[in-house]
């Protein structure tokens, strides 16, 4: 096929016709692919969900803040340890006194039993 021959002219005419038919289709496809889609509804839904999650987070943070505010600081914690140690000491003292009183009562009971007395004779 030579340039200028009837076969070449027919081929060029067919290619030009195909180009004229495909060009508007290609332009439509490019326009559809690049147009801005209305995403306002989606953005509003995501914004509402994020606002709700943020509100829940703030409520949780306030709750944690109140709990942390109620916790003792370093000085108060040290004071609590001292008070706890004092209470442990008092508890040991009471146990020792109770043990001593129990031993004394046992000695009295043993003495009375050895002496041959019963509760009815007292």
Image (cartoon, rainbow, N blue to C red):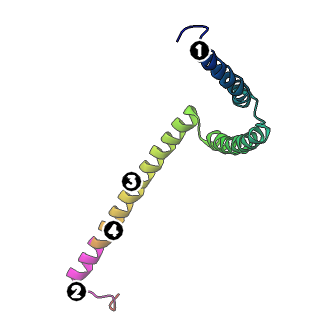
Residue 9, horizontal then vertical, whole percent: 63, 15
Q: Which residue is mark 1?
A: 8
User: Quarter of the image holding residue 28?
Assistant: top right
Mark closer to the observer (2, 3): 3
User: Could you classify mark 2 by the number of other residues whose Cα lies within 10 Å: few (under 14), some (14-19), or many (20 or more)?
Assistant: few
Mark closer to the observer (4, 3): 3
Residue extending furthest toward the left: 114
Q: Which residue is mark 2?
A: 116
* Viewer-nearest residue: 107 or 116: 107
Residue 121 is covered by the magenta coloring: no
Q: CA distance from mark 4 to mark 2?
A: 21 Å
* Mark carried by residue 92: 3
Of labels 4 and 3, earlier in sequence is 3
- Span highlighted in magenta in the image: 107-119
Of labels 2 and 3, earlier in sequence is 3
Q: Is residue 75 above or below residue 83?
A: above
Q: CA distance from mark 1 to mark 2?
A: 145 Å
Q: Which residue is mark 4?
A: 102
* Viewer-nearest residue: 88 or 37: 37
């Amino acid at each position: 096929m030579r340039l200028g021959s009837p076969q070449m002219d027919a081929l060029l005419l067919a290619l030009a016709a195909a180009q004229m038919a495909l060009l508007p289709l290609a332009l439509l496809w490019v326009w559809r692919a690049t147009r801005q889609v209305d995403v306002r509804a989606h953005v509003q839904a995501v914004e509402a969900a994020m606002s709700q999650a943020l509100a829940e987070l703030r409520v949780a943070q306030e709750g944690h803040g109140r709990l942390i505010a109620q916790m003792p600081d370093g000085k108060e914690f040290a004071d609590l340890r001292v008070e706890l140690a004092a209470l442990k000491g008092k508890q040991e003292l009471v146990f020792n006194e109770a043990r001593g009183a129990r031993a004394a009562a046992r000695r009295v009971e043993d003495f009375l039993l050895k002496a041959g007395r019963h509760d009815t004779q007292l």
